[in-house]
Amino acid sequence: MFEYAPAPESREIVDIKPSYGLFIGGEWVDSQGDTHHKTINPASEEVLAEVAWATEADVDRAVQAARTAFTTWSALPGSERAKYIFRIARIIQERSRELAILETLDNGKPIRESRDVDLPLVAAHFFYYAGWADKLGYAGFGPDPRPLGVAGQVIPWNFPLLMLAWKIAPALACGNTVVLKPAETTPLTALAFADICRQADLPPGVVNIVTGAGETGAALVNHPGVDKVAFTGSTEVGRMIARSVAGTGKKLSLELGGKAANIVFEDAALDQAVEGIVNGIFFNQGHVCCAGSRLLVQESVADEVLDALKRRLSTLRLGDPMDKNTDIGAINSAAQLAKIRELAEAGVNEGAERWSPACPIPERGFWFPPTVFTGVAQSHRIAREEIFGPVLSVLTFRTPAEAVEKANNTPYGLSAGIWTEKGSRILWMADRLRAGVVWANTFNRFDPTSPFGGYKESGYGREGGRHGLEAYLAV
Ligand code: NAP
Ligand code: MG
């Protein structure tokens, strides 16, 4: 084993204000209510800042500002809108170190991931959709597709700035204006993005950011002035939103939970597969909707794969997310930690065998060690419910048909992975897996040009790629 010296990233570059208001009509304004909420660093429980909780009246102001801005923004030629979006993309690149640090402080994810995965993808998303703004007539939705109007967008805490990019970039490219509500535990990068909008001279009201809790989100999606609702979050809240939006004429896209199968065949390159399993479930502490949380491994190689996996997990470093050597950071909140613990205990009680590497847990903050459950039956809660944490459930199979059946035996359908040497088997499997994304000999690969979205209870609509434009056009 290597010894590592500490390699902490410096936080000097970030300037966190003690208190934040709302970003409405291009200005920072106070909330009309007087409720504030503290956002903390989940790795230390240090209070980072206080943010306003937007009331219904605040949401109303933000929607009015977006409505007013829509008239001029939607009338701009696409090539003019593109200039603003390209400018935003470049500023994100210029400020990427600052944004990565801010994301890691507020969310708890390792700096290595926010720096090397989140931020490059955020910039890429804006670059990609900036490129579409003047080519919408060639996207396959008619010669002159029109925007919808005001988009109300609600996002979760696991990839705060990346989810913002997935929502805002295509909306603006298509000529819509937006009101976005970040998650209550991770508002800081969305607030920094508001500053970037000002820096880019984006016309006032095109982007509005309202911070708050679930009620703020509900006020936004239920506001009659909103023409389009885009939600990423839990299936439970997604269902409520689908009910409340039904019959209003608002266009809706939902990106919800997942319980993806990562399927390893005996002919796969097993060392690579082990890396893919680790990336599939331990990337971002497993706070990933498309995480490969169910490992399906062919029985003939199960022992070999599990031995190699346990050896590999013993080398992962859990701890300070700001340390550049850290692989596993903090769980985002006490509430999420409680949920993970409850499901892991259910796994033990239902008879699965629990394993974690020896791994010291820091005293303060919210932490959960990488955990593997073997002897998992399809009926166990840990095989059916989304844990949204660093917990892998291992099942075995004998034939490809059995792998397909087990993989599809879930109410979700967001993603799946296949590890095999045979191209024909990849295609055979991909045809039968009921999942929006199927990765072959890789996992958790994202690209702005590729559509992403679910089947069944994982939601509907696609984000990313040409397909992602449809959600923001009147087609
Ligand atoms: P969540 O509770 O559904 O929250 C998501 C967002 O909705 C947050 O901003 C939340 O605000 C807000 N919200 C809560 N109640 C609301 C309501 N009644 N009306 C409108 N908005 C409301 O989900 P989470 O626990 O934060 O996020 C984890 C879930 O998101 C997982 O299930 C995961 O699979 C899913 N997810 C899916 C994708 C995807 O692309 N498919 C990506 C990432 C995450 P507060 O933060 O204040 O509660
Ligand atoms: Mg926080």
Image (tube, rainbow, N blue to C red):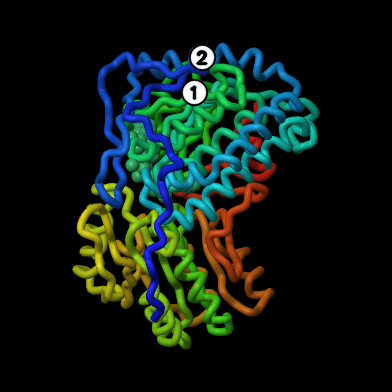
Q: Alpha-carbon neighbours of circle 1 within 10 Å: few (<14), some, or many (≥20)?
A: many
For the point 46% across and 34% down, the residue is 190
* Numbered circle sitting on residue 393: none
Q: Nearer the viewer, residue 93 or 253?
A: 93
**Is residue 415 among the parts visible in the rendering?**
yes
Q: Amino acid at mark 1?
A: Asn
The quarter holding residue 474 reads top right
Residue 157 pos. (x, y %): 39, 43
Instruction: Identify the amino acid type marked 2.
Output: Ala
Direction from residue 9 to residue 267 in the image, left or right: right
> Residue 392: x percent and y percent?
37, 67
Give the quarter of the figure containing the N terminus: bottom left
Residue 373, placed above or below residue 323: below
| Callout 1: SS | strand
The residue wearing badge 2 is 65
In this rendering, the answer to whether 216 lies above or below 417 is above
CB contact under 8 Å: marks 2 and 1? yes
Task: From the viewer's side, name the closer residue of 315 and 160.
Answer: 315
Identify the secondary structure beneath mark 2. helix
Q: Can you tell me whether the CB of the residue at mark 1 lies under 8 Å from the nearest atom of ligand 1?
A: no
- Residue at the location (48% across, 63% down)? 408
Q: Residue at image x 72%, y 19%? A: 76
Residue 239 visible? The answer is no
Q: Is residue 135 left or right of residue 333?
A: right
Left or right of 335 on screen, residue 81:
right
Between the residue at mark 2 and the residue at mark 1, the CA separation in whole angstroms equals 8 Å
Label placed on residue 208: 1
